[in-house]
Amino acid sequence: MKPIAHIHTDFTSKFGVPRQAGLVKELQATIVFEPEYRQAEALRGLDGFSHLWLIWEFSQSVGKPWSPTVRPPRLGGNARMGVFATRSPFRPNPIGLSCVELVRVEEHTPQGPVIVVAGADLMDGTPIYDIKPYVPYADCHPEAVGGFAQTAPERKLQVDIPAHLLCLVPEEKREALVGVLAQDPRPSYQTDSQRVYGFGFAGFEVHFVVTDGVARVVDIRG
C-alpha cells in the first residue's frame, strides 16, 4: 500500500494530540491528496455524508517493536491489556483508524480538491491510506459494549489562559487550544504540579502547568 494523502493538523508532535478522534471537535484539519489522486471525480458524492473513516499510518511507530500487552492511558497506565483490546500505536502493523466529521470539500485549491475535517486525532503530516464514508445504518451500534472504555472521558481540567497570551493565538484556533488542554494531554503518570509542559500547536509553542485541576498557560511563543 502507499499513501493517497497526508493530513495537515495543528500538532507537530504526539504530545497534545487527543487520545481519540472526536474528543476535541473544535480542531480542524485538511486532507491533501497526493498528485495522482487529485481528481474531483474521486470525491463525487462525498459531501452527502457527515462523517468519514480515515485509515492511516502511525508513522512515528514504523519499525518499532510491538508488544502483546500495553498500558492504556484510559486505565492510568497501571494495568496491562492485550494490544488488540486497545488502540495503541505499537502494533504488528502500524495502522490507525479514526472517525472524523466532514466539514467541507474544497474542490479548487492550489493542491487540487482537499477535504476539511473536524475532530481528528492525528499529527501533522500523517499519511492517509484510505478514506471511506461513515454509514450510520451499518456503522452505528447503540447497543455496543465498550469494555474498559465504555464512556467518553470528561474534560478533566479547567483552563486558564491569560488574555495577553491568548491574544497571540488566532481567534479561530482558541477554542481548539482550550479543548486540547482541558483533555489533560499529560502522560497519566506525570502529576508534578511544578513541572512545565510544552507542545507545538498551530505554529506556536504552548507551555503550561497543572495545579489543583487547572491547566494554566504560562507562555506562548510563535
Image (cartoon, grey):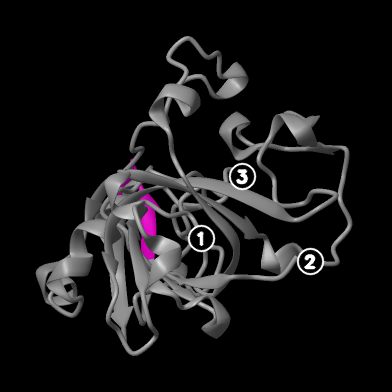
Disc 3, SS: loop
Say which residue label 3 marks. 189
Lower sequence index among marks 3 and 1: 1
Vertical side of 136 occupied by 28: above or below: below
Say which residue label 1 marks. 122
Q: CA distance from mark 1 to mark 2?
A: 15 Å
Task: Please tell me whether the stretch drawn in magenta is mainly helix, strand or loop.
Answer: strand
Q: Position of residue 14 (x, y in %)?
A: 56, 64
211 in magenta = yes
Which amino acid, by three-letter code, is at mark 1?
Leu
* Quadrant in the rendering for residue 72: top right
Q: Position of residue 48 (x, y in %)?
A: 28, 46
Start-end of magenta stretch: 208-214
Q: Which residue occupies the extreme front position in the image?
A: 41
Lower sequence index among marks 1 and 2: 2
* Disc 3 versus disc 1: nearer the observer: 1
Q: Residues within 10 Å of mark 1 (few under 14, many from 20)?
A: many
